[in-house]
Image: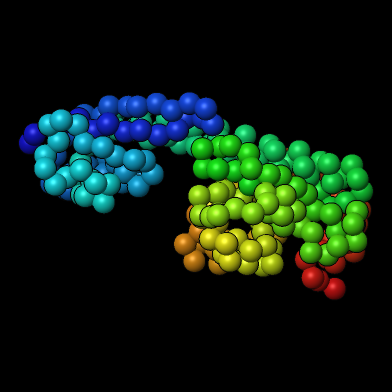
Amino acid sequence: MFTSSLYVHFGCSPVQCSIFQIDIGFCSSEGHPDALTILKEVASRVEVQPGPEFPPGLGTPCRLTSLISSYTRTSIAYDHLHMNDRDLHDSMLAVALEEAGYSRAEGGIPIGAALFTRAGKLVSSGHNRRVQQGDPSMHGETDAFRRAGRQKSYRDLVMVTTLAPCWYCSGLIRQFHIGKVVVGDSRTFSGGIEWLRENGVEVVDLDNNACRELLQGYIAVHPEVWNEDIGEE
């Protein structure tokens, strides 16, 4: 068995990043399944650069998945990675939820959305305006998309929405190759999220109570408008 250092770089917030050093011990893949699972997750979600003593040919994430690491040291990085991901996703969702609140105050369906860069920079935000503008195509996601203006590429953008995107909005996400979707609520309506996952889109479901309660409160009072919005009779 031999050891080396793995330098892991990932964003901790929209304005900060950190570099962590993890000591790696290489051995066969038997014996430490938990550590291997954690290392696979870390390797698949961060940029990996080899340290100066890293063995030649083992410097890529896909190669790293066959290696074993110290469970304790790696699990610290794993927990930190997920904590910061969750914080970032929550901060993004807060913008979409604020938009949903605007729609509710305007008498509309309380669904909001926002487009961000993967680092957390806000590109645009919007909300459902079916009632306000008499426009059945103006869902939260389409409003945010339109307000983003022309983009050369959407592949590195994140669509954040308080409700799982319907088939119409899921089609927009696939058409323009938006690579990641953060969802506040999929219990009220699951839309096309499984289809998006099957087609390679990363979907993060935060199962947020505030998003769910806001919309379900509206549906209880205006079921006919809700059914109209999702194409049900």
- Tally of marks: 0
189 relative to 35, above or below: below
* Nearer to the camera, 133 or 8: 133
Q: Depth check: 60 or 43 in front?
A: 60
Relative height, residue 98 to residue 113 (above, below): above
The single residue placed furthest to the bottom in the displayed view is 233
In the rendered image, which quarter contains the N terminus?
Answer: top left
232 to 204, vertically: above or below: below
Going 78% across and 45% down the picture, which residue do you hit? 100
Q: Is residue 190 left or right of residue 43?
A: right
Any part of residue 186 in sight: no
Residue occupying image coordinates x 53% and y 60%: 177
Residue located at (85% from left, 59% from top): 130
- The image shows residue 87, relative to residue 195, as above or below, that is above
| Residue 95 % position (x, y) | 70, 38
Whole-percent x and y of residue 159?
Answer: 61, 50
Q: Residue at x 45, y 36 (%)?
A: 82
In the picture, the quarter occupied by the C terminus is bottom right
> In x, y percent, where is residue 64?
23, 46
Among the 4 quarters of the image, the one containing residue 167:
bottom right
Q: Please name the colour scheme applied to the rendered image.
A: rainbow
Residue 67 spot, x, y in % from top left: 19, 44
Question: Can the viewer see residue 224?
Answer: yes
